[in-house]
Amino acid sequence: MADPFGLRENLMWRSKHETAVTYKALMPEDIVMQFTGLKEKNGEDIYEGDIISLIGATYTYVVKFEDYKFVCDHHNKPFGRWGDIYKFKELNFEIEIIGNIYQS
């Protein structure tokens, strides 16, 4: 069986007839994040897991995808959920990405 991705070392299971091979998930160092459809002030795409700030505001927020929508939770604060990320855009807040939960 061909191994186009070089995954032989990640082989988990092979049938006794050598017809089916199952591999571990492919995600060595990359994290898959879902795009919100929004861009921040510098034109960068905003993704699930990004830590954002509002220009002129004190707090930072983490973008999450829950209950079929993107929401913003206060980052490192006990205040809980701010709400739907699209409210920031509706209220004309300028958003800036300052990091993400995977690298910060």
Image: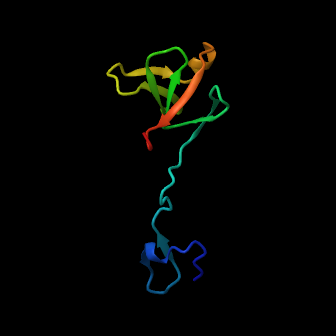
Residue at image position (43%, 26%) is: 73
Residue at 42% across / 76% down in the picture? 13
> Looking at the picture, how far across and down is residue 66, in whole percent?
47, 33
Q: Where is residue 92 in the image (x, y as percent from the top left)?
A: 63, 14
Residue displayed at 47% across by 60% down: 28
Outermost residue on the left side: it is: 78
Viewer-side residue, 69 vs 28: 28
x, y (%) of residue 1? 57, 83
- Position of 102 compared to 5: left or right? left
Q: 90 and 39: which one is in front?
A: 39
- State whether residue 19 is above or below residue 24: below
The quarter of the picture where the C terminus appears is top left
Q: How many numbered discs, if any?
A: 0
Name the residue nearer the viewer: 55 or 8. Answer: 55
- Residue placed furthest toward the right: 43
**Residue at the image position 45 percent from the left and 66 percent from the top:** 24
**Above-or-below relation of 4 to 36:** below
Give the answer, above or below, for where 26 lies relative to 86.
below
Colouring scheme applied when the structure was drawn: rainbow
